[in-house]
């Protein structure tokens, strides 16, 4: 038997040791399955993150009350976006996500500082800050994953840099765990998570609820979240039982 067999079994068990159920509310949506092409999926995620950082950069620059401060910011940015700056990379390789991570981290700190200086509701400012932190963390994780794969991306301005040629390159073969990280990032996107429940193998359960939603909960949303938990736990139990039986079968033959 391969020496890699038991480590793989252990890794699989660790992968299913925790459940996470997220409920997201949106004003509208387009339901799209993650592309089988991993490079395209990465580009869709990077494009989403880039768009949100740019959108918030415009929003906060316009919302700054102090005209003198606003004019100084515009001058310092030299016409570039307040948060995104001037992109050096804007495709979907390791360098692109590293740049998105850096921009989101800087933007989150700026939003925190501007919390009381902008003409935006404090609740909206908090949401924007959390979304930027999520982009920062997810970009960091994906950047580390992509260090193990060869993806051609060039600095903006290079004649070889264009979306068509980037997407036309040979797809990368992601490990299952790595693809799941990207899948989760795409699922969460840049939306606000209203409710989140994490269930550990040891029975430890943690539920997080948005403060705004908790102040005015809607029963049908609670029902959807609870039903999702029931379905997930049922599937989780079946999957774990199958893994245990498979392991017992292998052990009986040793």
Image (tube, grey):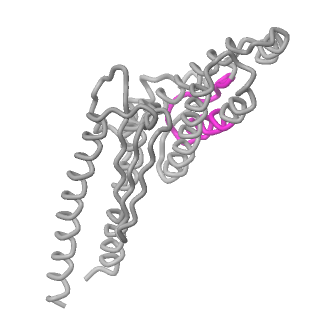
Please provide percent x and percent y for residue 80: 70, 16
- The quadrant of the image that shows the C terminus is bottom left
Image quadrant assignment for residue 189 = top left
Q: Is residue 57 left or right of residue 232?
A: right
Q: Residue at the spot x=41%, y=30% of the render?
A: 44
Pick the residue in front: 155 or 28: 28
Image quadrant assignment for residue 120 = top right
Q: Which residues are magenta?
A: 83-105
Above-or-below relation of 111 to 19: above
Please provide percent x and percent y for residue 207: 41, 51
Above-or-below relation of 25 to 176: above
Pick the residue in front: 41 or 167: 41
- The quadrant of the image that shows the N terminus is bottom left
Please provide percent x and percent y for residue 236: 24, 60
Q: Is residue 78 left or right of residue 211?
A: right
Please provide percent x and percent y for residue 237: 21, 64
């Amino acid at each position: 038997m391969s020496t890699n067999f038991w480590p793989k079994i252990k890794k699989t068990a660790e992968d299913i040791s925790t459940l996470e159920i997220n409920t997201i509310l949106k004003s509208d949506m387009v339901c799209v399955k993650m592309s089988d092409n991993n490079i395209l999926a990465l580009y869709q995620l990077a494009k989403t993150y880039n768009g949100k950082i740019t959108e918030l950069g415009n929003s906060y620059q316009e919302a700054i009350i102090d005209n003198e401060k606003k004019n100084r910011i515009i001058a310092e940015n030299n016409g570039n976006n307040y948060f995104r700056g001037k992109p050096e990379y804007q495709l979907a390789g390791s360098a692109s996500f590293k740049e998105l991570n850096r921009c989101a981290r800087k933007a989150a700190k700026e939003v925190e500082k501007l919390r009381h200086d902008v003409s935006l509701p404090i609740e909206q400012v908090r949401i924007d800050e959390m979304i930027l932190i999520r982009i920062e963390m997810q970009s960091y994780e994906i950047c580390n994953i992509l260090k193990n794969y060869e993806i051609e991306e060039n600095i903006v301005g290079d004649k070889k840099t264009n979306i068509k040629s980037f997407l036309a390159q040979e797809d990368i073969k992601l490990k299952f765990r790595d693809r799941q990280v990207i899948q989760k990032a795409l699922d969460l996107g840049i939306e606000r998570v209203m409710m989140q429940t994490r269930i550990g193998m040891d029975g430890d359960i943690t539920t997080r609820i948005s403060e705004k939603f908790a102040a005015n909960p809607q029963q049908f949303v609670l029902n959807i979240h609870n039903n999702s938990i029931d379905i997930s736990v049922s599937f989780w139990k079946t999957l774990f039982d199958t893994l245990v039986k498979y392991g017992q079968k292998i052990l009986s033959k040793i």
